[in-house]
Amino acid sequence: MKKKLYILLLLFPLWGLGGISCNSDDDNNTQDPISQLPPMTTTGENTIGCLVNGEPFTDSGLMNNFYQFVNGEHILVINWTQGPNSSYKDGQLVIKGILIQENLVYTLKHSSYVDGDYMGGGATFTSNISELFGQFETNQNFTGEIYFTRFDDDNNIMSGTFSFEAQEIFSNEIVSITNGRFDLTFTN
Protein backbone atom coordinates (compact mmCIF):
# COMPACT_ATOMS: atom_id res chain seq x y z
CA MET A 1 0.00 0.00 0.00
CA LYS A 2 2.84 2.39 0.85
CA LYS A 3 4.39 1.83 -2.61
CA LYS A 4 1.15 2.80 -4.39
CA LEU A 5 0.71 5.95 -2.29
CA TYR A 6 4.35 6.92 -2.87
CA ILE A 7 3.93 6.54 -6.67
CA LEU A 8 0.72 8.62 -6.65
CA LEU A 9 2.42 11.38 -4.66
CA LEU A 10 5.27 11.44 -7.16
CA LEU A 11 2.91 11.62 -10.14
CA PHE A 12 0.59 14.28 -8.69
CA PRO A 13 3.03 17.23 -9.00
CA LEU A 14 3.83 16.25 -12.59
CA TRP A 15 0.15 16.02 -13.48
CA GLY A 16 -0.55 19.36 -11.78
CA LEU A 17 2.24 21.11 -13.66
CA GLY A 18 1.07 19.61 -16.93
CA GLY A 19 -2.43 20.96 -16.35
CA ILE A 20 -1.09 24.48 -15.75
CA SER A 21 1.14 24.53 -18.81
CA CYS A 22 -1.68 23.40 -21.09
CA ASN A 23 -4.10 26.16 -20.08
CA SER A 24 -5.26 27.74 -23.35
CA ASP A 25 -6.32 30.95 -21.56
CA ASP A 26 -2.71 31.64 -20.62
CA ASP A 27 -1.64 31.26 -24.25
CA ASN A 28 -4.29 33.73 -25.44
CA ASN A 29 -3.29 36.40 -22.92
CA THR A 30 0.30 36.53 -24.16
CA GLN A 31 -0.50 36.41 -27.87
CA ASP A 32 0.61 39.35 -30.02
CA PRO A 33 -2.48 41.48 -30.90
CA ILE A 34 -1.58 41.62 -34.61
CA SER A 35 -1.45 37.82 -34.82
CA GLN A 36 -5.10 37.79 -33.65
CA LEU A 37 -6.20 39.66 -36.79
CA PRO A 38 -7.34 37.76 -39.89
CA PRO A 39 -4.62 36.89 -42.40
CA MET A 40 -4.01 39.25 -45.32
CA THR A 41 -5.68 37.53 -48.27
CA THR A 42 -7.08 38.72 -51.61
CA THR A 43 -9.66 36.04 -52.44
CA GLY A 44 -12.90 37.45 -51.00
CA GLU A 45 -12.78 35.61 -47.64
CA ASN A 46 -15.08 38.23 -46.01
CA THR A 47 -12.64 39.05 -43.23
CA ILE A 48 -11.82 42.40 -41.68
CA GLY A 49 -9.87 43.33 -38.59
CA CYS A 50 -7.79 46.08 -36.99
CA LEU A 51 -6.32 47.20 -33.70
CA VAL A 52 -8.40 49.70 -31.71
CA ASN A 53 -6.05 51.50 -29.34
CA GLY A 54 -3.81 48.43 -29.59
CA GLU A 55 -6.57 45.85 -28.94
CA PRO A 56 -7.69 43.38 -31.67
CA PHE A 57 -11.09 43.96 -33.29
CA THR A 58 -12.48 41.58 -35.89
CA ASP A 59 -15.92 41.45 -37.44
CA SER A 60 -18.37 39.03 -35.89
CA GLY A 61 -21.55 40.10 -37.63
CA LEU A 62 -23.11 40.34 -41.04
CA MET A 63 -21.31 42.73 -43.34
CA ASN A 64 -23.09 45.09 -45.70
CA ASN A 65 -20.44 46.33 -48.14
CA PHE A 66 -21.26 47.93 -51.45
CA TYR A 67 -19.76 49.79 -54.39
CA GLN A 68 -22.43 51.45 -56.50
CA PHE A 69 -22.84 54.08 -59.14
CA VAL A 70 -25.59 56.39 -57.86
CA ASN A 71 -26.67 59.76 -59.28
CA GLY A 72 -23.63 59.96 -61.55
CA GLU A 73 -20.97 59.06 -58.97
CA HIS A 74 -19.38 56.03 -57.35
CA ILE A 75 -19.83 55.31 -53.66
CA LEU A 76 -18.03 52.61 -51.66
CA VAL A 77 -19.09 51.66 -48.13
CA ILE A 78 -17.33 49.11 -45.89
CA ASN A 79 -19.06 48.20 -42.60
CA TRP A 80 -17.93 45.98 -39.74
CA THR A 81 -19.37 45.16 -36.32
CA GLN A 82 -18.50 43.38 -33.10
CA GLY A 83 -21.26 42.88 -30.55
CA PRO A 84 -23.92 43.27 -29.27
CA ASN A 85 -22.62 42.96 -25.74
CA SER A 86 -20.66 45.01 -23.24
CA SER A 87 -17.85 45.57 -25.75
CA TYR A 88 -19.90 46.67 -28.76
CA LYS A 89 -17.93 48.25 -31.61
CA ASP A 90 -18.58 49.08 -35.24
CA GLY A 91 -16.76 50.88 -37.99
CA GLN A 92 -17.44 52.31 -41.41
CA LEU A 93 -15.21 53.47 -44.25
CA VAL A 94 -16.76 55.56 -47.04
CA ILE A 95 -15.36 56.78 -50.34
CA LYS A 96 -17.65 58.89 -52.50
CA GLY A 97 -17.25 60.42 -55.92
CA ILE A 98 -14.01 58.61 -56.77
CA LEU A 99 -13.47 55.64 -59.07
CA ILE A 100 -11.63 53.04 -56.94
CA GLN A 101 -8.38 51.66 -58.36
CA GLU A 102 -5.83 49.16 -57.08
CA ASN A 103 -2.47 50.27 -55.65
CA LEU A 104 -3.63 53.79 -54.75
CA VAL A 105 -3.89 55.36 -51.30
CA TYR A 106 -7.14 57.17 -50.50
CA THR A 107 -7.31 59.70 -47.66
CA LEU A 108 -9.99 59.32 -44.99
CA LYS A 109 -10.78 62.68 -43.44
CA HIS A 110 -14.45 63.55 -43.89
CA SER A 111 -16.58 61.98 -41.22
CA SER A 112 -20.01 62.23 -42.75
CA TYR A 113 -21.87 63.63 -45.67
CA VAL A 114 -22.20 67.39 -45.51
CA ASP A 115 -25.59 68.07 -47.03
CA GLY A 116 -25.15 64.74 -48.82
CA ASP A 117 -22.28 66.07 -50.93
CA TYR A 118 -18.54 65.68 -50.61
CA MET A 119 -15.75 64.17 -52.62
CA GLY A 120 -13.32 61.86 -50.92
CA GLY A 121 -13.41 59.48 -48.01
CA GLY A 122 -14.18 59.32 -44.34
CA ALA A 123 -14.31 56.91 -41.46
CA THR A 124 -16.41 56.48 -38.34
CA PHE A 125 -16.04 54.23 -35.32
CA THR A 126 -18.69 53.67 -32.66
CA SER A 127 -17.96 52.03 -29.33
CA ASN A 128 -18.81 51.98 -25.68
CA ILE A 129 -15.09 52.29 -24.83
CA SER A 130 -15.75 55.98 -24.19
CA GLU A 131 -17.48 57.29 -21.07
CA LEU A 132 -20.39 58.03 -23.38
CA PHE A 133 -21.49 55.73 -26.16
CA GLY A 134 -18.70 57.10 -28.33
CA GLN A 135 -19.18 58.22 -31.92
CA PHE A 136 -15.68 58.81 -33.29
CA GLU A 137 -15.24 60.51 -36.67
CA THR A 138 -12.35 61.47 -38.92
CA ASN A 139 -12.05 65.16 -39.68
CA GLN A 140 -9.51 67.72 -40.92
CA ASN A 141 -7.26 67.12 -37.89
CA PHE A 142 -7.67 63.35 -37.45
CA THR A 143 -7.37 61.46 -40.71
CA GLY A 144 -6.44 58.09 -42.12
CA GLU A 145 -5.77 56.07 -45.23
CA ILE A 146 -7.16 53.11 -47.11
CA TYR A 147 -5.12 51.19 -49.69
CA PHE A 148 -6.52 48.61 -52.11
CA THR A 149 -4.24 45.70 -52.99
CA ARG A 150 -7.13 44.23 -55.00
CA PHE A 151 -10.25 45.86 -56.34
CA ASP A 152 -12.05 43.49 -58.70
CA ASP A 153 -15.33 45.01 -59.87
CA ASP A 154 -16.07 41.96 -62.07
CA ASN A 155 -15.92 39.45 -59.18
CA ASN A 156 -16.96 41.93 -56.46
CA ILE A 157 -13.84 41.41 -54.32
CA MET A 158 -11.84 44.11 -52.53
CA SER A 159 -8.77 43.65 -50.36
CA GLY A 160 -6.37 46.03 -48.69
CA THR A 161 -5.28 47.87 -45.59
CA PHE A 162 -6.50 50.86 -43.58
CA SER A 163 -5.72 53.00 -40.56
CA PHE A 164 -7.13 56.19 -39.08
CA GLU A 165 -7.46 58.36 -36.01
CA ALA A 166 -10.89 59.70 -35.15
CA GLN A 167 -12.28 62.15 -32.61
CA GLU A 168 -15.30 61.56 -30.38
CA ILE A 169 -17.90 64.18 -31.30
CA PHE A 170 -18.80 65.19 -27.71
CA SER A 171 -15.78 64.52 -25.50
CA ASN A 172 -12.98 65.08 -28.09
CA GLU A 173 -11.43 61.76 -27.01
CA ILE A 174 -9.27 60.18 -29.74
CA VAL A 175 -9.35 56.58 -30.96
CA SER A 176 -6.49 55.06 -32.96
CA ILE A 177 -7.33 52.40 -35.56
CA THR A 178 -4.16 50.70 -36.83
CA ASN A 179 -3.07 47.62 -38.78
CA GLY A 180 -6.46 47.39 -40.48
CA ARG A 181 -6.83 44.71 -43.13
CA PHE A 182 -9.75 43.46 -45.16
CA ASP A 183 -10.62 40.88 -47.81
CA LEU A 184 -14.30 41.40 -48.60
CA THR A 185 -16.97 40.82 -51.17
CA PHE A 186 -19.38 43.62 -52.06
CA THR A 187 -22.61 44.21 -53.92
CA ASN A 188 -23.10 46.55 -56.85
Image (tube, grey):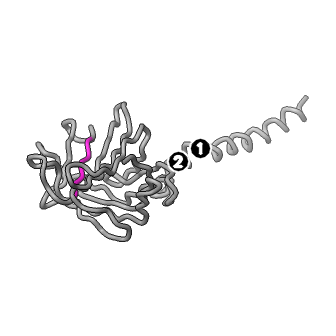
- Decide if residue 116 is on the left or right side of residue 94: left
Q: Residue furthest bottom?
A: 103
Residue 151 image-quadrant placement? bottom left
Dot 1 amino acid type:
Ser
Q: Which residue appears farthest toward the top when viewing the image?
A: 1
Residue 101 bears which disc, if any? none
Q: Amino acid at mark 2?
A: Asn
Q: Position of residue 140 (x, y in %)?
A: 12, 60
Residue that lies at the very extreme toward the front in this rendered image: 72
Q: Nearer the viewer, residue 17 or 3?
A: 17
Q: Tell me what residue is drawn at x 55 percent, y 46 percent.
A: 26
Q: CA distance from mark 1 to mark 2?
A: 6 Å
Res. 24 mark? 1
List x then y, in percent, for residue 136: 20, 47
User: 43 left or right of 50?
Assistant: right
| Tag 1–tag 2 contact (CB < 8 Å) | yes
Q: Residue at x 44, y 39 (%)?
A: 60
| Label drawn at residue 28 | 2
Q: What residue range appears in magenta?
A: 121-126
In this rendering, does residue 52 appear at all? Answer: yes
Of helix, strand and loop, which mostly describes the magenta segment?
Answer: strand
Q: Is residue 159 left or right of residue 173?
A: right
Q: Residue at x 42, y 37 (%)?
A: 61
Q: Residues within 10 Å of mark 2 (few under 14, many from 20)?
A: few
- Determine which quarter of the picture holds residue 20: top right
Q: Where residue 84 appears, x then y in whole percent?
A: 36, 31
Element under disc 1: helix
